[in-house]
Structure formats: C-alpha cells, structure tokens
Image (cartoon, rainbow, N blue to C red):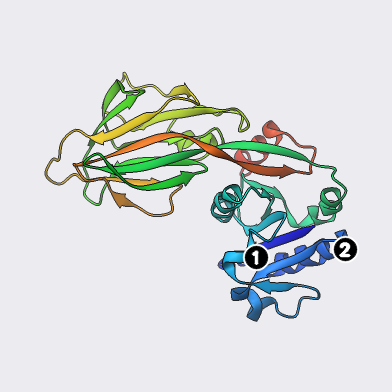
C-alpha cells in the first residue's frame, strides 16, 4: 500500500510525529510518499519518495495528514475528490477528526492487514450564484457559515429549503453543518450533536435576535438557498467554508447548499466510539 503523508509544519509537534509516522509506515509495509515541498525537512527519511503536490494524493491508497482538525479537513476534501481513504494523525490540540495520536502509530499494521473500518462522512456542496449564474462551488467537511463582516451589526438572511422559505434570520449569522461538523462551531452556537456517520444537515442561528429561532435538523436531500434580504449601512454579509477564508456575499448573489455526491472516507483502527471521543475531547480540561 502507498501512504501519502501531509505534515502541517506550522504545528510544533508535526515534524517529530511525521518522522515517527514514516518509521511506523515503513515497519507496516507501506511505501511513503511526500510532497517535493517537504524534501528539505524530511529528505533523510529512509525509503520516502517525493513527488509533485498534484501527484501526491492521486498516487496513494491512504492519506495521512499530520496536524490538527484544519489539516484533516483540507486533506479530506482532496482525498474525497480522488476517492482515497484518510486517517488523521494528531499533532494539534483538540483534533476531533484525527483518528490516532502518536502513541497509536503501532496500530498502522492493522491497516496493512485490512483490520479496520471505514466511516463514510457526508460533505456539503456550496455553490455561489451571481445574478442567477453559477460562479463557483466549494466542498465543506464541517460547515458553511454566514456571518457579519468587519463592522458590528446584525445580518438579515433569507433561508429557503427546497425553494420554500424557512425564515428570515436577523442574527450574527447562520451555520449549515454536516454531522461531522456538529461538534465544531455549530455546537458552540447551541446546535445539536449528531453522530458523524449519519446523513443530515444542521441549521443553527448565531445569536439570533429572536426567541423563535431554534436549531433545525433537515434530511440530507434538502437543497437550501441563502441570500441577503437587504444591504444596510455598516453591515456586510460574508461566508466561509470550513473556516478557510472569508468572502463577501454581495446583494446580487445567493448560495445553494446541498449534500455532495461524494463522501469522505475516514479510517478507524481504534476501538473507541463517537461518544468516547466526544467525552475525551469535551472534558479535556476537567
């Protein structure tokens, strides 16, 4: 089997853990691939082959991002597009999405022996329309968030489900989350926690100016449309997919949100379940 290793070297622990991972992969019988950009830091690793960034994931069987949840999310999108499995290695802090820590590296032999399970996680597809014309499409592992811009002020958002109005949200924003993302920003905003292998879309308002706006859980086949009702002075509407960048949502634009046709495939080699992980992460400071 071929392993694509993607270290996030902005994490202090990522470099030593990457070396441990490479040794564990070699012992388990994997061939290890890394990007040419990592040759300077890891060129001395025995048996490691360096390829162009564009060839890294397509040439692999399993993708191993080393970092935190952000690292896993970025790699998971690329892995999903290429139909590859993924296992995150924790070199961060909270890391809900990382399947193993450094002390679990000896478990990699289970993957080579086929002793693992696959958790399929649904993704969201967010398409931006300008004057009715599709301009771009992004994939979301966790969520797409609509929020106010740099100036303080409530946003006025119109949300439709399958072309029928749900509500006009006057709030700091709204979150559309996958079950995977239910333990991220949505949870912090008071949304429900959902087992990540289920298929559903969570809609949670951020500090709504009404007692009527409760969190919703919709069926995975629901198609949403989000647009700004009006442009008020001092208030801009922005959106962000998985927190990667913030982009203005202009008044002549709308966003269509639906379940993607592709899924992320997360490898599980440990015996702990979703509740075990949830309790470990949420009670980490207790």
Look at 81% across and 61% down and name the residue there: 30
Residue 272 placement, left or right of 154: right
Q: Which residue is mark 2?
A: 27
Q: Residue at x 65, y 36 (%)?
A: 120
State the quadrant of the N terminus. bottom right
In front: 51, or 168? Answer: 51
Give the residue pinned by disc 1. Answer: 14
Q: Residue furthest left?
A: 233
Residue 199 location, quadrant = top right
Q: Secondary structure at mark 1?
A: helix
| Above-or-below relation of 179 to 66 | above
Q: On the image, which quarter does residue 32 sit in?
A: bottom right
- For image coordinates 22% across by 46% down, the residue present is 250
Marker count (numbered): 2
Q: Where residue 195 sits: x, y (%)?
A: 61, 29
Vertical relation: 258 (above or below) 266: above
Note whether 160 is above or below 82 in the view shown: above
């Amino acid at each position: 089997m071929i392993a694509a290793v993607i270290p996030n070297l902005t994490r202090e622990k990522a470099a030593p853990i990457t070396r441990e991972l490479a040794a564990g992969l070699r012992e388990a019988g994997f061939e290890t691939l890394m990007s040419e950009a990592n040759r300077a830091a890891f060129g001395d690793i025995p048996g490691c082959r360096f390829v162009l960034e564009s060839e890294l994931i397509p040439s692999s069987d399993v993708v191993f991002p080393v970092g935190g949840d952000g690292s896993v999310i970025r790699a998971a999108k690329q892995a999903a597009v290429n139909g590859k499995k993924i296992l995150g290695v924790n070199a961060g802090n909270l890391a809900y999405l990382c399947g193993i820590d450094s002390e679990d590296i000896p478990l990699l032999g289970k993957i080579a022996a086929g002793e693992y399970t696959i958790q399929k996680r649904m993704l969201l597809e967010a398409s931006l329309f300008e004057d009715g014309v599709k301009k771009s499409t992004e994939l979301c592992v966790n969520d797409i968030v609509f929020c106010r811009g740099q100036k303080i002020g409530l946003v006025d958002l119109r949300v439709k489900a399958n072309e029928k109005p749900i509500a006009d949200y006057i709030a700091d924003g709204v979150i559309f989350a996958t079950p995977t993302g239910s333990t991220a920003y949505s949870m912090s905003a008071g949304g429900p926690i959902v087992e990540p292998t289920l298929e559903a879309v969570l809609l949670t308002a951020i500090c709504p100016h009404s007692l009527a706006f409760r969190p919703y859980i919709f069926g995975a086949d629901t198609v949403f449309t989000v647009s700004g009702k009006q442009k008020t002075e001092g208030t801009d509407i922005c959106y962000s997919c998985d927190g990667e960048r913030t982009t203005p949502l202009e008044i002549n634009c709308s966003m269509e949100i639906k379940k993607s046709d592709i899924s992320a495939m997360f490898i599980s080699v440990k015996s702990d379940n979703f509740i075990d992980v949830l309790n470990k992460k949420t009670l980490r400071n207790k």
